[in-house]
Amino acid sequence: MENRTEGAWIIHHTKKLQEVTRTSDFEDIELAGKCGLLLSSLAASEQESTLNKDKVNAISDSLNINKKLELPIIKQTLKDAHLIDISQSGDISILGITTSGVLTHTSEIFNESSNNFQKASLELTNYSSDKPIKEKLLKEYIGDNYKLDSKTNTKLFQQSEDIGIIDFEQFDGAKTYFNGNLFKRDSVEKTAKVLSSLSSDDAKKVSDLDILISKDGCVTIETALTILGQTLMSKLQSIAMYDFNEVSNNQHSKIFLTKPSSFAKFGNPFEDDALDLAKAFISSLIYGLKVSTSNRGKIQDYSMLTNTLRKLLRGERVGPCTAIGQDYQVLEMNRVIQLEHGHGSRFYMRLLKYDIAQIALDVIEKGDLAEKSTLESGISSTSVSNYTGPEENRWKVRRKKSTSPSLNVGELLRTMRN
């Protein structure tokens, strides 16, 4: 497995581990992953940065990193790897690092002290990301390649299931494993297989939605629900056929569907946006386009949106307006952009992560978002303070499957397994 791919899976596993309490068997993954998450949030992509202790602590809070128990170890690990410098006052200096560089460094930190059990957990998801695979075949592959005895192998699978590192469905008398990356590659072929497994009525519904998303780039969850109905929509979300992106604050949330393959045209979609930063950037921009109002600095149309991105990529600042200080808090906390106060409630923004903005521009100009979006402005214009990525939203649905028999997706996975 290449370093970038391994780094992306480490980040994936770490986000899952942050949701559970017992993680002792995956400590090297969790440490390396949190180092990667912090490194990403500290660094700009093309210039050296220095952040004071208060900013570092705020970023740690946003990443769910314990400032007393975890942050000192993470900072020391990054310092030992010659990735950051720490002053006596606690300020941190860091050279420019792209997302690709973050993933590579994450992998290198992990491999300093990892064991076969944890390496096997990464391959477990990597091997099942292309298509669903039967339990017997996957267990044999992992056990043989990582020299795990039967007891240890069973323990790995059980813990991976409990944590959510890997997902499964029980059908044909056995478990079939899969994960949320199924539709990031070969999506046309896999979509055709899904349609072949559905009733003619459901297949038409999915085809109608697929055409709409391909044409318009994204649709609101309300539109998707009208077309599909709740049961069919939940099934498709369960197997990650569509990405469910959510922007929210303390007053409301807005969810819209995009295709995982939107990013596949411009590289490896799993690696290039492993941290979901490009998706968050696009989500915030679309929010500004469809929900914001003119008096606070509304993005008027797609031409203005792309011109804004190009201006940022030229190194120029954008603004000032009120919306910049409110709608891009997620991007500010993740150091994708930097805000500069203008006057009153108005702010400018400058770009810090050029690689992320370039992916966002490519997807908007050349990908499935190139046409006008169908996002409706059905909510009041207030600040976007949170972004929830597709995998977290998918897993919320999967956790409900034990109480919702209708969410069994075995018939969909069976067609893709062959």
Image (cartoon, rainbow, N blue to C red):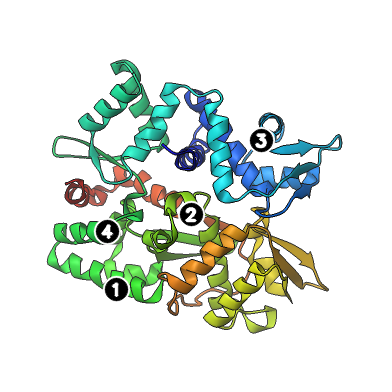
Q: Which residue is mark 2?
A: 389
The numbered mark, 3 or 2, whose residue comes first in the sequence reads: 3
The numbered mark, 3 or 1, whose residue comes first in the sequence reads: 3
Q: Nearer the viewer, mark 3 or mark 4?
A: 3
SS for dot 4: helix
Q: Which residue is mark 3?
A: 66
Q: Report how far apart the C-alphas of labels 4 and 2 lie in the structure.
A: 21 Å
Mark 1 closeness class: few <14, some 14–19, many ≥20 residues within 10 Å: few
The numbered mark, 3 or 4, whose residue comes first in the sequence reads: 3
Instruction: Between residue 235 and residue 262, name the one nearer to us.
Output: 262
Residue 188 located left or right of residue 315 = left
Q: Position of residue 65 (x, y in %)?
A: 64, 38
Mark 2 closeness class: few <14, some 14–19, many ≥20 residues within 10 Å: some
Residue at 63% across, 57% down: 353
The amino acid sitting under disc 3 is Asn
Q: Report how far apart the C-alphas of labels 3 and 1 lie in the structure.
A: 45 Å
Mark linked to residue 211: 1
Residue at 58% across, 45% down: 101
Q: Report how far apart the C-alphas of labels 3 and 2 lie in the structure.
A: 22 Å
